[in-house]
Image: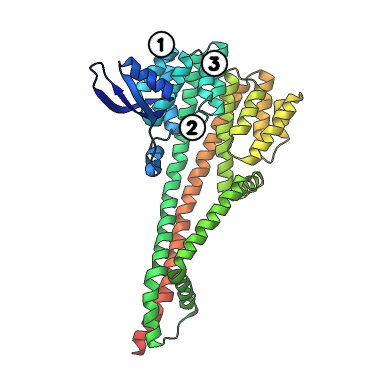
Amino acid sequence: MKRFKYKARNKDGGVVVGEVEAVNDITAAKLLRQKGLTIISINPKRELGFNFLKKYKEKVTSNDITNFTRQFATMINAGLPVTESLLILRNQSKGRFQAIIGEILSDVEGGHPLSSALAKHPRAFSKTYIALVKSGEVGGVLDRVLARLADNLERQQEFKGKVKSAMIYPVIIVFGMSAVAFIMLTFVVPKLTELYDQFDADLPITTKVLIALSTVMSKFWPFVLIGFAVLLYLFRLYHATKKGKKKIDQLILKVPLVGDLTKKVILTDLTRTLSLMVGSGVSILESLSISSEVVGNTVMSESLDDISTMVEKGFPVAYSFAKHTEAFPPILAQMISVGEETGKVDEVLEKVSHVFEVESDAKLKAITAAIEPLILIVLGVGVAFLVISIIMPIYNLTTQL
């Protein structure tokens, strides 16, 4: 929603100035008239350029969507109408998400299906979410679909939380090491270099290397930072291209430990989502098509596109998955084959998802356990290098005096 500044007269003839929030100026004027005001002027409020922090703070998060879905499912299961449930949820929400729910409520009250109203907000609600809600509306089981969707989102949140928690420690250590190295090379080593020059000391090769790096950093550090920013920008531009994203995604999957973990995480999310969609009445073809658009890796996305094409031509789902071993492990095709034979594809996919989740947890623990000693080794080598490069010349100087 947008904010509008208005100037109006009240019933007593007094001038009133204020702000109102609405979808457009027509709706804003209607709201003011309902309050008994006679409008003199109404104009959209200009957003300041530095207001991006507020917008970021009001950004709709996955946690917002998860809480919304759980509360919405509870209300629908309790027998509340969709409009009344949305009204309660709008009043409970804040910021940008409150405005989104308000727009959804307006569309539903205007006769639009809930799925169509949600589809107008693709940044908040994914295609998978919208397809599931649509299937619930068509099948008359919206309450059940929302409940399963809420369960699925909560499991995703929990799993993503585990991954993020495990990565916090290594990221902090690496950032700290980089900051210390930058400070040492830029501000500390140049002071020591002056001391070495005064005594005309004979310096070891490691000290010469350190001084050379320090000279570059102390004299050209703004250009180094600008160069790093330019490289990062060029990388983002390359990643934004179809060819670049595919190449980077291929490299990520080939990185030892990290690539395998990334693949397991994607497979966990993919199989869980497919299970939910198939179990909620979405056709397997549509489920594959939607999954190919929302999966986070280009290699798997293209494989799912090809699998969707093969299924559309009449090939079994398991056979289609078996043809893409570069993206999907053989166990997935084997389990889907069992599901096709028994007519319980959704249940089988849910069990496979649990298997991938357990494997992901194990990989995550292994990587976390390997990173800690690796960081200690790198720190030890760094400290040893600094000791040899800085302390040894000073020691030699003191022994010569």
Horizontal side, residue 349 vs residue 400: left or right: right
- Of tags 1 and 2, the one toward the viewer is 1
- Name the foreground residue: 149 vs 186: 186
Q: Is residue 83 above or below residue 158?
A: above
Around disc 3, counting alpha carbons within 10 Å, would you say few (fewer than 14), some (14 to 19), or many (20 or more)?
many
Q: Position of residue 76 (x, y in %)?
A: 43, 14
Q: Which mark, residue 136?
A: 3
Name the residue at 47% across, 49% down: 369
Around disc 2, counting alpha carbons within 10 Å, would you say few (fewer than 14), some (14 to 19), or many (20 or more)?
some
Inter-mark Cα distance, 1 to 2: 27 Å
Inter-mark Cα distance, 2 to 3: 21 Å
Q: Please name the residue that numbered disc 2 is placed on.
A: 156
Q: Is any atom of residue 351 visible in this view? A: no
Task: Give the color scheme: rainbow, by chain, secondary structure or one colour.
Answer: rainbow
Q: Check contact, mark 3 vs mark 1: CB within 8 A.
A: no
Q: Amino acid at mark 1?
A: Leu
The quarter of the picture where residue 182 lies is bottom left
Q: Does dot 2 land on a helix, a strand or a loop? A: helix
Q: Which mark, residue 80?
A: 1
- Name the foreground residue: 143 vs 275: 143
Dot placed on the residue nearer the N-terminal end, 3 or 1: 1
Horizontal side, residue 332 vs residue 41: left or right: right
Dot placed on the residue nearer the N-terminal end, 1 or 2: 1
Inter-mark Cα distance, 3 to 1: 16 Å
Dot placed on the residue nearer the N-terminal end, 2 or 3: 3
